[in-house]
Amino acid sequence: MSDAKTSYPIEIEITEPSSLNEQAAAALVIVGALVAVADRRVSPVERDEVIRFIRDRKLAPHVSDERLCAMFDELAERLEEPDFANVVIDTLRPVSNLPLSSHLMELSERVAAADEDVHPHEVQAIKLLRLLTLVLPRAKPVVPSAAGAELQAALKE
């Protein structure tokens, strides 16, 4: 893979607070993709499990199945790059204040079992995700610019 690819931010980067559904979907998808690539062979049944999990729990109702599939494929590819840890952290950080950790852990376990062969590397990926969900820095609230200036002034006083 080229160095140029690793220097660009991933396409699903979310910068607006109004896209919380997409941020939550990306966090769920990255967890599933990380476990799926851990054994070096991504099975379609693993991707299907991610989408089914998100749909069954209505965790990202405004994100289409096609978008979820595209996210999964893109993130699974990015997780094969040397900077995969940064991709995981950058995707999870924006939703670290949401109560998603139990969903993230359940999803990771379901993806590991989806192909009926839980590989030791998948177990390691789940352990890594468990640690990340415990220690990931909390997201800072995004404040609109006018209110943000007032808040900054109030904090200085």
Image: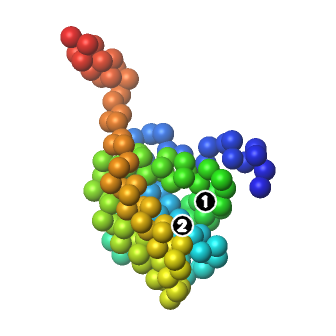
Question: Given the image, on which type of amino acid does mark 2 rest?
Answer: Ala
Say how many tags the image has.
2
Residue at x-position 33% and y-position 30%? 143
Residue at x-position 49% and y-position 66%? 125
Where is residue 7 drawn, in percent x and y?
69, 41
Which residue is nearer to you in this view: 112 or 26? 112
Residue at x-position 48% and y-position 78%? 112
Residue at x-position 54% and y-position 66%? 33
Question: Given the image, on which type of amino acid does mark 1 rest?
Answer: Leu
Q: Distance between the residues labelled 1 and 2?
A: 8 Å
Residue tagged by mark 2? 33
Q: Is residue 63 visible?
A: no
Label 2, secondary structure: give it. Answer: helix
Where is residue 135 drawn, in percent x and y?
35, 49
Residue reaching furthest to the top: 157
- Check residue 79 in the rendering and tell me which mark sits there, or answer none: 1
Residue 68, placed above or below residue 142: below
Q: Badge 1: few (under 14), some or many (20 or more) residues near its Cα, within 10 Å?
A: many
Which residue is nearer to you in this view: 18 or 46? 46
Residue 25 in which image quadrant: bottom left
Residue 134, placed above or below residue 4: below
Where is residue 17 drawn, in percent x and y?
39, 41
CB contact under 8 Å: marks 1 and 2: yes
On the picture, is 18 further left or further right than 43? left
Can you say which quadrant of the picture contains the C terminus? top left
Between discs 1 and 2, the one toward the N terminus: 2
Label 1, secondary structure: give it. Answer: loop
